[in-house]
Image (cartoon, helix red, strand yellow):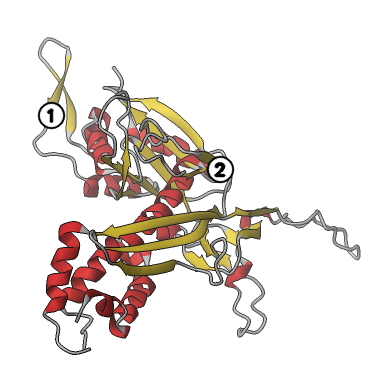
């Protein structure tokens, strides 16, 4: 069997389609997909009205035989906006295509098993270059919205990867401001107190009717917090002893602080637990501060940057999209789950169907044969609770 026959074989085509269908981000470890469940909708812009659960007005007391007084409607607002077109391209040549051609030549007849070595090698390449880039882009937008209140629209770069020209927490082509996150910077050091800071911000959120369900951070941030003297003190790992001279001296007990210990302490204080997320996306850029440096440098960036603590809110809204028409008299559904928004996967410009589109891959013969393909989608995450964001950036201090 030649390579062209292999690529157009029905079993291979079906395997690619199945790969696209099964690429569910929540199942692949993308945490943002649990906060913003994906919905495929045949549209290019999205609008949704949301009612705040805590927005109902208390009833007035009335005199006997008088009528009730309506104070006003519940608090409602609209979310929505245009979707962003996103695309990826694959180019399979050189030693890679030689390897696949060698495998395909061993095939006899028209039978191709989806689990065969040649099919698996091909599907791995399709997944790496046509599906994973789209999954990374979706997760990056979800987590940037959650952590900054903004969605970064990453523009196409020139061939030498100089647009954007430098890398600095990613320099976007366009920033779509969805909401203003309640963010602040706290300078760490010997006097930093994580539990005190957390209590203050959780209490402040509660006064706005917002329940914080968990504290999201990277493992680097967690380890820095565990090493703080105030954290060790709160966990009983740091004690003050009085010396014979009457001066106070710090005595460190044995053992390192752990996430389990800190979460147990937070729970005992009615504070949300810590959740660690070290997922990363990759890109090719020019290194910041080195305009003459190598182009196309691969960088790996965390969805939750080191030093950032995201106070993840609990959904507390009336979501009419959750109404089940088959249940009589069930008028509304209050969403108090991990989902604090929705990620719409819509219809890409110029395409007939909503969802992820995969074109090819096709074989291009010649002196330098290659396999080329494209993938794309239109998408955008939306917050149900844009007033609820709280983000703290812990920075190194003196």
In the image, residue 355 above or below residue 75: below
Identify the residue at image location x=51%, y=55%. Answer: 85
Q: Viewed as shown, does residue 14 lie left or right of 337?
A: left
Please provide percent x and percent y for residue 270: 40, 48
Q: What SS does tag 2 mark? A: strand
Location of mark 2 (residue): 176
Q: Is residue 261 above or below residue 343?
A: above
Residue drawn where x is 37% and y is 31% of the image = 168
Residue 225 % position (x, y): 27, 35
- The image quarter containing residue 78 is bottom right
Quadrant for the N terminus, please.
bottom left
Q: Is residue 132 visible?
A: no
| Residue sitting nearer the eye, 333 or 27 | 27
Q: Quadrant of residue 219?
A: top left
Residue 311, relative to residue 105: is it above or below?
Answer: above
User: Can you say which quadrant of the picture contains the C terminus?
Assistant: top left
87 left or right of 319 in image:
left
Residue 33 at x, y percent in the picture: 41, 60
- Mark 1, residue position: 252
Few, some or many C-alpha atoms within 10 Å of disc 2 (few <14, some 14-19, many ≥20)? few
Given residues 101 and 340, the one toward you in this image is 101
Q: What residue appears at the point 41 percent right and 62 percent down from the top-left corner? A: 375
What residue lies at 80% left-to-right and 54% top-to-bottom?
Answer: 72
Q: Is residue 145 left or right of residue 224?
A: right
Total number of numbered discs in the rendering:
2
Whether residue 320 is visible here, answered yes or no, is yes
């Amino acid at each position: 069997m030649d390579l062209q026959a292999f690529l157009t074989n029905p079993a291979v085509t079906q395997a690619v389609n199945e790969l696209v269908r099964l690429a569910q981000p929540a199942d692949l470890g993308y945490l943002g997909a649990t906060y913003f469940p994906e919905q495929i909708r045949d549209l290019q812009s999205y609008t949704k009205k949301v009612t705040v659960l805590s927005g109902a007005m208390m009833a007035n007391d009335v005199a006997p035989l008088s009528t009730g007084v309506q104070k006003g409607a519940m608090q409602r607002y609209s979310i929505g906006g245009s979707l962003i077109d996103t695309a990826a391209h694959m180019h399979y040549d050189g030693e890679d295509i030689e390897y696949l051609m060698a495998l395909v030549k061993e095939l006899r007849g028209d039978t191709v098993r989806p689990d065969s070595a040649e099919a698996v090698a091909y599907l791995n390449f399709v997944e790496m270059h046509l599906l994973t880039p789209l999954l990374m882009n979706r997760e990056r937008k979800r987590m940037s919205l959650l952590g900054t209140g903004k969605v970064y629209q990453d523009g196409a770069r020139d061939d030498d990867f100089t647009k954007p020209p430098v890398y600095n927490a990613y320099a976007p082509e366009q920033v779509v401001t969805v909401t203003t996150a309640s963010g602040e910077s706290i300078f760490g050091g010997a006097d930093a107190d994580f539990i005190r800071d957390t209590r203050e911000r959780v209490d402040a959120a509660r006064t706005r009717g917002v329940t914080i369900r968990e504290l999201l951070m990277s493992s680097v941030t967690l380890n820095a917090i565990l090493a703080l003297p105030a954290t060790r003190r709160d966990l009983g790992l740091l004690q003050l002893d009085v010396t014979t001279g009457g001066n106070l001296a710090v005595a460190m007990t044995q053992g390192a602080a752990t996430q389990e210990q800190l979460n147990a302490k937070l729970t005992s204080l009615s504070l949300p637990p810590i959740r660690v997320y070290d997922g990363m996306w990759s890109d090719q850029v020019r290194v910041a501060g080195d305009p003459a440096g190598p182009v196309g440098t691969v960088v790996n960036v965390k969805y939750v940057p080191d030093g950032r603590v995201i106070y993840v809110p609990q959904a507390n809204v009336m979501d009419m999209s959750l109404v089940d028409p088959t249940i009589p008299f069930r008028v509304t559904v209050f969403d108090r789950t991990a989902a604090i928004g929705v990620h719409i996967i819509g219809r890409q410009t110029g395409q007939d169907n909503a969802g992820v589109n995969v074109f090819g891959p096709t074989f291009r013969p010649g002196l330098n044969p290659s396999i080329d393909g494209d993938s794309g989608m239109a998408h955008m995450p939306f917050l149900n609770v844009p007033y609820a964001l709280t983000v703290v950036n812990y920075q190194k201090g003196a």
